[in-house]
Image (cartoon, rainbow, N blue to C red):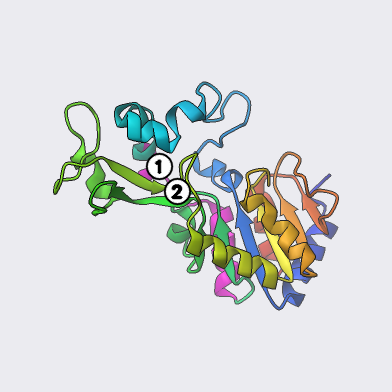
Amino acid sequence: MSTANGSVERLAQMIRDARSAVALTGAGISVPSGIPDFRSPGTGLWESVDPMEVAHIEVFRRDPKRFWSYYRPRFGALADKQPNPAHAALAALESRGLLDAVITQNIDRLHRKAGSNRVIEVHGTIETSSCLDCAASFTLDLVEGLFDDEGVARCHGCGGPVKPDVVLFGELLPERAMNEAYALAAGADLLLCVGSSLEVHPVAGLPAVTRSAGGAIAIVTKGPTPYDQEAEIRLDGDVVDDLEALLAAL
């Protein structure tokens, strides 16, 4: 498949014609910002570690030191990352009234940094962390000051372990965010799937929701997805190039 001009023009026309267009984004949209995805051979975050051993809620409860030893440098690195032109393109579509919302699996805050206003973060965000004991909330810039001598972030108030407000394995996705995501997918004439393998459930079920309601799906991502044969448009080039071409075609 290619990023032929005809496909970009068709996608641009679909966006113009849609009463409601919604974007669904995954890790691939943030790779150009220097954030590795999870599963790419050689570079993925899970290439050298079993996620069930470091990113499961039971691991956090049993051994928060182990969790934070893996995640502390990664969250620190994320704090300085900046949006790339692909994020900016989606923000521009929203500002033009051509995109209703961004549903994202990413926790990196880059859609909001780029200027997107309606962002549904179905896997949570690194923006805040919360104490598991008293529910006190801490913004990202404060978390580094919470670490004790063992490398565990602890609440200044009660001393309980502090966990990022991201969804770990073994946790349910936030109900309010998922309800909003399902409603948006069901009401969309076009679901634009960007940088996602569409393999992680329940979010991977959203394109089927759109299709069942009579809407179309367009996929802009490298690598195969389970919905490739059902997509009206399939672009698999560089995500920045593809979205900038789309923006120029509108």
For the residues marked 1 and 2, what is the alpha-carbon distance in whole angstroms? Answer: 6 Å
Residue 78 circle label = 1
Q: Are marks 1 and 2 in contact (CB under 8 Å)?
A: yes
Crowd class of label 1 (few under 14; some 14 to 19; many from 20; radius 10 Å) = some
x then y, percent, for residue 92? 56, 67
Residue 108 circle label = 2
Q: Quadrant of residue 16?
A: bottom right
Which residue is rendered at x = 24% and y = 38% of the image?
A: 153
Classify 124 as above or below 216: above
Q: Which residues are magenta?
A: 77-96
Q: Quadrant of residue 57?
A: top left
Kind of residue sitting beneath label 1: Leu
x then y, percent, for residue 95? 55, 73
Q: Earlier in the sequence, mark 1 or mark 2?
A: 1
Which residue is rendered at x = 19% and y = 45% of the image?
A: 155
Is 22 in front, or is 54? 54
Is 58 in front, or is 161? 58
